[in-house]
Image (cartoon, grey):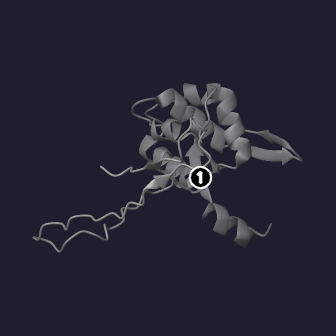
Amino acid sequence: MTDLLQQEITGPPVTVMIAGQEYPLAYPMAAACAYKQATGKSMFDPQESASLSLRTDPDRWLALLWAGLHQEVSAGNWTAPVTLQDLRRLRIADADLAKLDAAVWAAFRPSQPARKERKETADPNAGAPGEPAPLAVFAVKPATIENAESTGSMPVHVDVSD
């Protein structure tokens, strides 16, 4: 895959500075697998990704950061340059958490599956603003029961209107 195509799919490259070192941050499927291995949860679950927050759950947020640091070191083998334990040992004062958080979300959002948006459709029977809505008119065709079991009567015509 060309770099241009990769950038179109995943967005521009994102890097983070951790303990004076700059690392690329991305969320391919290998990162999703690493996150699941660390937390037991899928980062593609809408409820899970909605609750990933540095403020409310720093441990899962660190797991998300760690998962995004994974790089392919050889065909099919992925590893992170920093362990999850090392990330937990970082002094908060030394880490610019606001920049790290912004980078995590910049790298993570393009990887999320598109959420299905519910679009509100206009009611074709609605009146103009300020006018009462017209009464809905339904044409009901009575149902007919064919091949009814014979009890000595003819097929019954059933009216299903109110």
Q: Nearer the viewer, residue 120 or 37?
A: 120
Residue identified by numbered label 1: 113
Report x, y in % for residue 129.
14, 72
Extreme-bottom residue of the structure: 128
Q: How many marks?
A: 1
Report x, y in % for residue 137.
28, 65
Q: Nearer the viewer, residue 61 or 41?
A: 41
Report x, y in % for residue 19.
58, 39
Q: Quadrant of residue 93?
A: top left
Extreme-right residue of the structure: 75
Image point 57% across, 49% down: which residue?
16
Position of residue 26 relative to residue 151, above or below, is below
Position of residue 107 relative to residue 42, above or below, is below
Image point 56% across, 26% down: which residue?
88
Q: Describe residue 71's horizontal placement relative to residue 128 as left or right.
A: right
Identity of the amino acid at label 1?
A: Pro
